[in-house]
Amino acid sequence: MSDSNPRERTVLSVLFEITQQLNENATLESVLEKIAERICSLVAADTASVMLFDETHSALLCRASHGLPPEESKKLSFSTGEGVAGWVANEGEAVVLGDAHADERFKDLPNQTTDIQSMICVPLQTRESIIGVITVTASLESRFNDADRDLLSLVAASVVKDIENARLYRLAVTDNLTKCYNRQYLAKRLPAELERATRYEDNVALILIDVDKFKSINDTWGHDTGDIVLRRIADICRECVRDVDTVVRYGGDEFVILLPSTDSDGALQVANRICNDVNNTPVESDGNTIRTSVSAGVHASLKGIEDGKNLLNRADRAMYTAKKAGGNQVSLAENN
């Protein structure tokens, strides 16, 4: 690409940043967020979103966005063929709209506050299939042109394989039941996080959570209800942590939460919130109301000076202290 085209140089910069993130083992979410942020600036859009198909390939779900309110981003989804995004994913053709509301494919979403007049939507297409779409919007009519569409199509074609590889890796390290990361992922992430903490003299904390009397739940209400309980607790854990934190189904009814740049006080606040939310959120199953609680152990490593095994063991011992004290509470690991 010649030096006379600054937009093409910007595309190269975007692709370089994405490759750099992937080489640093960034999460799929963080890679998609970087893509959304950079393409938004690339075509001077108000918002950008990256939507990927769910596991059944029947719905597009927003996996990252820039410029959208968080509550809108979380609820952004389309069935195959629904809305402009669904049409693009179905047909595999990029679309640029100067007046989105005049297009019969456009669909207003409930409680949407974002003003959308112009739009570009391009498919994320591998050799095998379409895995999602990238969309940018603006509040001005006729904001985008065919050159903008072609530019986004170029970016989409350049990053789609990286996105697909990251997505497949995410599936490989994800627990099928709860959609949390699995133990295999923690085995790689924890040493890397401790190394980062040591390098930057930062803290890293770990919370180990165990469901109180989970065997009794399975014995009384059945394993299907037990699965519902585990999924609900996983949801609560995700709701209580930051994007940079990692929620792991450690095994059975145990969860681990890895919190970078967090000391003991910060981790205790998160653990207590999870404990309270679980206790105050009964699970409904087949007309039955099941109250649950958890015990949590917290330990923080100052400047990452401990190895992962020791960090886990100390959080585990603290969790058992909470359980022996009656459960439904949080315990901090002892200093020695």
Image (spheres, rainbow, N blue to C red):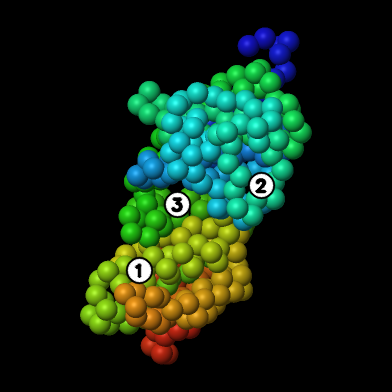
Give the secondary structure at mark 2. loop
Q: Tag 1: residue type?
A: Ile
Give the secondary structure at mark 3. helix
Q: From the viewer's perspective, is 317 left or right of 85?
A: left
In the rendered picture of this protein, how many numbered marks are placed on residues? 3
Residue that numbered label 1 is attached to: 228
- Percent x, y for residue 303? 58, 60
Q: Quadrant of the N terminus?
A: top right
Residue at 49%, 57% in the rendered image: 246
In this orientation, does residue 295 appear?
A: no
In the rendered structure, which disc, 3 or 2, sits on the residue that comes first in sequence?
Answer: 2
Residue that numbered label 3 is attached to: 189
Q: Quadrant of residue 47?
A: top right
Q: Nearer the viewer, residue 40 or 3?
A: 40
Residue that numbered label 2 is attached to: 68
In the rendered structure, which disc, 1 or 3, sits on the residue that comes first in sequence?
Answer: 3
Residue at 24%, 75% in the rendered image: 222
| Mark 1 Cα-neighbour bin, 10 Å: few <14, some 14–19, many ≥20 | some
- Percent x, y for residue 23? 50, 35
| CA separation in Å, label 2 and label 1 | 31 Å
